[in-house]
Image (spheres, rainbow, N blue to C red):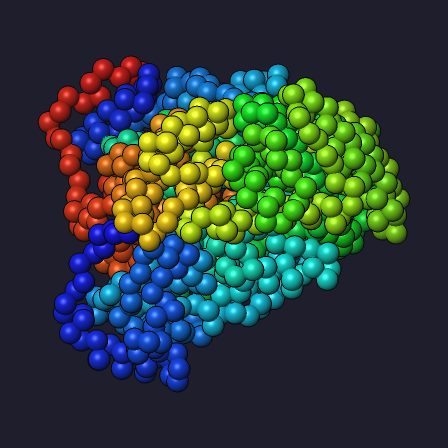
Amino acid sequence: MSDTLRPRDAKDVEAAVQSALAEGKTMEIVGHGSKRAIGRPAQSDLTLDLSTLSGVTLYEPQELVLSAKAGTPLAEIEALLAAKDQQLAFEPMNCAAIFGGAAGPGTIGGALAANVSGPRRIKSGAARDHFLGVCAVSGRGETFKSGGRVVKNVTGYDLCKLMAGSWGTLAVMTELTIKVLPRPETEQTLLIRGLEPGQAITAMTAAMGSSCDVSGAAHLPAEVAVRVPAGEIAGGAITALRLEGFSPSVAERMRMLEALMRPFGELASTDETISRRFWAAIRDVAPFAAEGPAPPALEDERALWRVSTAPSRGAEFAAIIANAAHVHIFYDWAGGLIWLALDPSHDAGAALIRGAVAATGGHATLIRAPPSVRAAIEVFPPQDPSVAALTKRVKDSFDPRGVLNPGRMWAGV
Amino acid sequence: MSVAMPLPDQTVLARRERIVAALRDIVPGEGVIAAEREMRPYETDGLTAYRQLPMVVVLPETTQQVSRILAFCHAEGIKVVPRGAGTSLSGGALPLSDGVLLGMAKFNRIREIDFANRLAVVEPGVTNLAVTQAVEHAGFYYAPDPSSQIACTIGGNVAENSGGVHCLKYGMTTNNLLGCELVLMTGEVVRLGGKHLDAGGYDLLGVVTGSEGLLGVVTEITVRILKKPDGARTVLIGFASSEDAGECVGKVIGAGIIPAGMEMMDRPAIRAAEEFVHAGYPLDVDALLIVEVDGPRAEVDHLITRLEVIAHSCRAVTCRASRSEEERLLFWAGRKAAFPAVGRISPDYYCMDGTIPRARLPQVLKRMRELSETYGLAVANVFHAGDGNLHPLILYDANRPGELERTEKFGADILRLCVEVGGVLTGEHGVGVEKRDLMPAMFSEADLNQQQRIKCAFDDKGLLNPGKVFPTLHRCAELGRMHVHAGRVAFPDIPRF
């Protein structure tokens, strides 16, 4: 059991990293631990627990900007925003379902460090696109900042982009500034029933290529659709298209979208409540929720992969996998984001999935598997040698001694 | 104007003949320009007050040539300055006397248009507008629209992370990219991203975007394209004060409306634009808002009605919504011509580019008026009101001794003011050489050192576009040195469990 440090402020974080450097120790950086089971299982000498570094430090709704300490609960931020009819447009995922724990949605620092983005990614961008400014302590024990609190800024390198998706391997973020956006007045979802994946991709491509401004496009084969906890929509495969905005606009776009989708199959539309519930389930990958009793034993759960590819290649990718393994699949991001659940195995299906990604382009990350599997195979996408070398040099520029989350993404990084 | 650039390396200049010959081996024919008269067009960019002839100009046509040029320069210790169309307003493409000017204009092909995946694969020398022109027959467009879009290149847009009037709703360049092919200073070619969304590892594309040509040379770019909205309408709203206009902008956003564009002009800018293009702007107001909403007809009409209600609640003096596409374009014509319009009323003008938290606008404008009196120089303001990006235009006459220097001082004061109120030095034009020495107003030494360490990860010898962005150049070895204080008390008094 490693020692846990709970810094009270950013100065404490700096002192902690400096001390770790002086003692030659490594650190695991955690917030609420909601995504702690993602990545290579690395042993660290110390745990730096940022959950006490909490609180919204600035929120100006009319400026569309919010700053918060890294350990601030996402739930607190989302409640604050909701009170002003605003939201985090990137729809961060709540990992509680897939890990079967009670960890909840986690912290703002964790959401940005993992760059998790939900169904609205295709319209509003990823978490990284809303990341305006950061204050952090590098693995050199130095406090630095980048960006600012305004949405338009090109002063210096955009280090926020590097922080997003770096899983705590470059620096310990202490405070983040993000762009927030108005919450749509209403939403509706159009369902098309009974499509095969290939047809569904064609339908979603047509919808995304229209001026209907679709903010969510997902396809669930029948065996996955029954697992969506939004009851009323069940019955065969479903392809779902979300429209959000002001009521008159949503109504007009729904008419346009229905006309466009009618040739594809039987249509149904959902009201706002069911639509919200449905997209929350897609965001949280609820169809592949952990099934065992809590606390979950990852050994018994199916392996879960997250694959990003060109939308038009989505069905082809899935077909390669389905031919070779017992797998459940659903598609988000109009076919560009594929979630796969496979029966447990020694490599969680890695060889098969990496092979399929090589054929169709994109990248795959193993999201859920027991530690022994995550130790044995690459969890994050393998990189070609030139990108791997550049990645290592970037890591060294922040954390040359490998103090922060060593090996979480790749060995040596 | 004067700015200190890295001292020319005499050993490089002494080898000029040999270097030119080596470059001719890599790029045959007319791709290497060494005659002074022919290099003249490359001596400056959009910031014409700075001029410098390069040692030699090379115009490669293939990634392999770019790779070989950079590998050669890396091995020989020769500096390289990349250049797109040369429209930078911050001196980003200013040559170095001992440097190779790497012009990317011949990379002008659109390689692939993929409507199914809503993307285009283009070479960096393709102009911004040409991307839209290549896809508009199918009703698509490329969203970032810097005002130089007819001339500026996508490669330059990536280097500068260019914005435009529509970036509040549709994002800047960084939000509209999927991938790129990048040549490092060593000549190594790396591919970042692709046709899929998001990086599988570090977001290297994200840090390359807006790096002002200091990290690598982009030779291919994959951009997202969007379906054009069905329609758009624009409303012109005049106010007796900038305070009222600022309040209106805040209320629009507070009402959950993100306009496609929201521009503000002050009295001098309104007058200059109206006299130039006769767009029908009211001349008896202190601030004019141009607000555009787009989408299906029902949405646009609904929002125009709401905008009118908000405008009147903020004491609007005039309020006119466009009733036809011609009228909408006319409303924009004044704003789009604002810079040349100011150019008509003054021999020279200097365009600034800071961003401020929008609520501080009245304070910033008031201070700017005071500075204007102190310096004895007039200023006209054009403002991307939605995102707080200010473009003050300082009016001066370069032929009057000392006026240019006064203008520069005035400009620097404005940018420092932006930082003081919580804003930043540059919203979309880049740091370049222009704002380089102001960087310490916004960043500490530790902040700048960490940025330069990234530079070292990409360019260990500091040969790519040196003298831009960073006020002080450090050697990578010096930046990489660790100062670990062994023997200190471990974790002094941090609560531990």
| Residue reaching furthest to the left | B487
Residue B152 horizontal/vertical position (percent): 50, 59
Query: Which quarter of the figure is the N terminus of chain A placed in?
Result: top left
Q: Is residue B365 above or below residue B111?
A: above
Write the residue at 41% across / 31% down: B368
Residue most extreme to the bottom? B29
Drawn side of residue A213 relative to residue A81, left or right = right
Asked whether residue B228 appears in the rendered view, the answer is yes
User: Which quadrant holds the C terminus of chain A?
Assistant: top left
Q: Is residue B296 above or below residue A76?
A: below
Q: Residue B47 location, x and y as percent?
A: 38, 54
- Residue A179 is situated, as x and y percent measured from the top left of the image, at 52, 31
Q: Residue at x 33, y 76 (%)?
A: B37
Left or right of A241? Residue B449 is left
> Can you give x and y, in whole percent of width and height, for residue A197 in the image?
74, 51
Q: Residue at x 44, y 74 (%)?
A: B62
Q: Looking at the image, which is closer to me, A139 or A373?
A: A139
Residue B102 appearing in the image: no
Q: Which residue is depicted at the point 38% across and 46% down?
A: B396
In front here: A232 or B139? B139
Q: How many marks?
A: 0
Along the viewing direction, whichever of B294 and A91 lies nearer the viewer? B294
Q: Is residue A355 above or below residue A251?
A: below
Q: Name the side, left or right, on which A134 lies relative to B490.
A: right
